[in-house]
Image: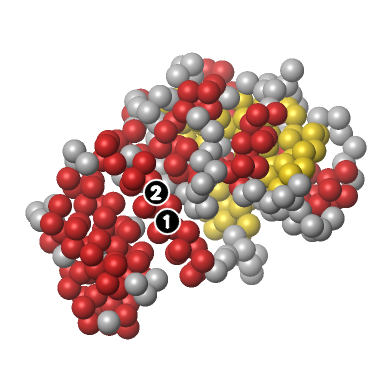
């Protein structure tokens, strides 16, 4: 039985998946299986995958596209390893990635559930910059309250090695979400397991961008779902609840839905009136989209992030 199961979900990435697969096969740590979950591709993804003749590769195909959460869950349910690593099909793991992560698990407490790292972000022009993930360590204990405040937001699932037992305890990825799929899982995991940050890049993350309008819509929906799902744990901390309202309100205003966004911004201010920063966007939204966007751009450093 392999110690590590690496899961690569993919959809219509025949031209890129070879790079991702090769980066896994190049790992200095050798005791792994590689599970590729083809989420209903209509291109030559299967052919590109079959090109690799390695017994450790398992290919699974969805007949219909089900989304990233479902593809990851299929991989988890098929995984034989004690630990599960995730990688996107257009990214690359550095050769020592799994070695570094397994070593951490072997020397730390059995309550350690997730070992993750930072990443190199590579844009469409090929520019490479370091993206540092937030540092959460076992000495911090269970950081569920911090997770509810989105303090685990910038942990990249593509850098994570997860103890498989986490999924038995915290559950699989939520297949109803189109955004924040990894964040929502991390929130649940922090309730039961410690996290460990390796303060160095473990992957090359290729940022192809996306549709801002589409992302905003999915982001609003995800934030509303998370607030509803964890409301009983959030509501007793009025400042935290206000921050959730505020984040949704800002996003709605950015999407051009000023009236609905203003309602959330006002709810934030009424929930926690001690913080004046909650009321400013609500007032500015009364003057229309152009003024809202212009004024708020100048205050991003002092406003809470959505």
Q: Which residue is mark 1?
A: 221
Above or below — where is 275 with respect to 288?
Answer: above
- Quarter holding residue 186: top left
Q: Nearer the viewer, residue 160 or 216?
A: 216
Coordinates of residue 133 in the picture (x, y in percent): 46, 45
Callout 2: SS: helix
Q: Which residue is mark 2?
A: 225
Residue 83 spot, x, y in % from top left:
61, 25
What residue do we see at 19% from left, 58% from top?
Answer: 267
Quadrant the N terminus occupies? top right
Instruction: Examine the rendered structure and indicate whether residue 221 appears above or below residue 256.
Output: above
The residue sitting at the front extreme is 64
Distance in Å between CA atoms under marks 1 and 2 = 6 Å
- The answer to whether 30 appears left or right of 141 in the picture is right
Cβ atoms under marks 1 and 2 closer than 8 Å: yes
Q: Residue at x 13, y 57 (%)?
A: 270
């Amino acid at each position: 039985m392999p110690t590590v199961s690496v899961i690569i979900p993919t959809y219509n990435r025949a031209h890129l998946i070879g790079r991702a697969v090769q980066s896994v096969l190049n790992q200095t740590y050798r005791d792994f299986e590689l599970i590729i979950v083809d989420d209903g591709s209509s291109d030559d993804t299967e052919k590109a995958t079959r090109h690799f003749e390695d017994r450790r590769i398992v290919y699974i195909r969805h007949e219909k596209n089900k989304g990233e959460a479902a593809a990851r869950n299929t991989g988890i349910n098929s995984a034989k390893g004690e630990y599960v690593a995730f990688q996107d099909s257009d990214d690359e793991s550095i050769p020592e990635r799994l070695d570094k992560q397994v070593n951490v698990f072997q020397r730390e407490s059995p309550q350690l559930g997730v070992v993750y790292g930072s990443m190199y972000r590579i844009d469409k022009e090929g520019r490479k910059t370091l993206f540092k993930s937030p540092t959460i360590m076992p000495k911090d204990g269970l950081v569920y309250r911090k997770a509810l405040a989105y303090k685990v937001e910038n942990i990249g699932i593509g850098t994570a090695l997860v103890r498989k037992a986490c999924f038995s305890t915290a559950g699989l990825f939520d297949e109803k979400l189109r955004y924040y799929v990894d964040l929502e899982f991390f929130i649940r995991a922090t309730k039961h397991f410690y996290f460990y940050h390796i303060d160095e890049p473990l992957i090359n993350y290729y940022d192809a961008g996306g549709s801002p309008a589409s992302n905003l819509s999915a982001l609003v929906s995800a934030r509303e779902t998370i607030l509803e799902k964890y409301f009983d744990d959030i509501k007793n901390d009025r400042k935290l609840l206000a921050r959730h309202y505020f984040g949704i309100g800002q996003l709605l205003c950015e999407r051009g839905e000023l009236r609905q966004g203003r309602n959330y911004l006002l709810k934030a201010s009424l929930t926690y009136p001690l913080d004046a920063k909650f009321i400013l966007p609500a007032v500015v939204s009364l003057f229309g989209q152009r003024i809202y966007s212009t004024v708020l751009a100048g205050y991003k450093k002092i406003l809470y992030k959505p």
